[in-house]
Image (cartoon, rainbow, N blue to C red):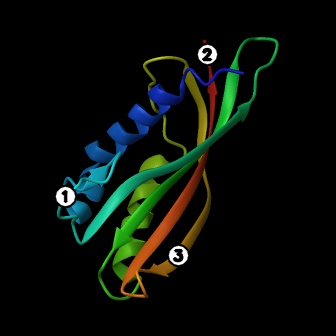
Amino acid sequence: MSYAMSGALQAAIYGALTADPALSALVGADIYDAVPTGTVPDTYVSLGRESARDASDQTGAGAVHTIEISVITTQPGFAGAKKIAGAVSDVLHDADLTLERGRLIFLHFTQARAQRIDAAAGREIRLRFRARVSDE
């Protein structure tokens, strides 16, 4: 197994999200690897949890990563958050991303969970993606 491509995968995902004009039209520059301190925007996208497992084979080291991307908002209802989540999914599902190290074999949407947060005042949608990387 190699976890060495994790940083490259995260950077490519972040780059794809921040470069997408449709997503930027919805959230501006409020796409974060780490939520900023101080005043937090009313709506933003945040890279979240990640897990990885070995996917090495005879050709070399590799891993399968499960990655969460969250859409968080204080807007009432889920309509706005779902529109943003759809844009995130459009950017990442089956994306052909170039990594600084290794190669992305696939990146697929696998699951989403929408829930109320902050005593029901806020909304969060967690999108889960599965990525296979190879250290070539």
Q: Which residue is mark 3?
A: 114
Q: Residues within 10 Å of mark 3 (few under 14, many from 20)?
A: some
Q: Amino acid at mark 2?
A: Asp
Q: Is residue 65 visible?
A: yes
Q: Residue at x 57, y 44 (%)?
A: 50
Whole-percent x, y for residue 108 in the image: 60, 48
Whole-percent x, y for residue 39 in the image: 17, 64
Q: Residues within 10 Å of mark 2 (few under 14, many from 20)?
A: some
Considering only order in the chain, which callout, 2 or 3, is on the residue closer to the N terminus? 3
Q: Residue at x 61, y 25 (%)?
A: 3
Among the 4 quarters of the image, the one containing residue 61: top right
Pick whichever, 126 or 107, lies toward us.
126
| Residue 135, disc | 2
Considering only order in the chain, which callout, 1 or 2, is on the residue closer to the N terminus? 1
Whole-percent x, y for residue 109 in the image: 59, 54
Foreground mark, 1 or 3, reads 3
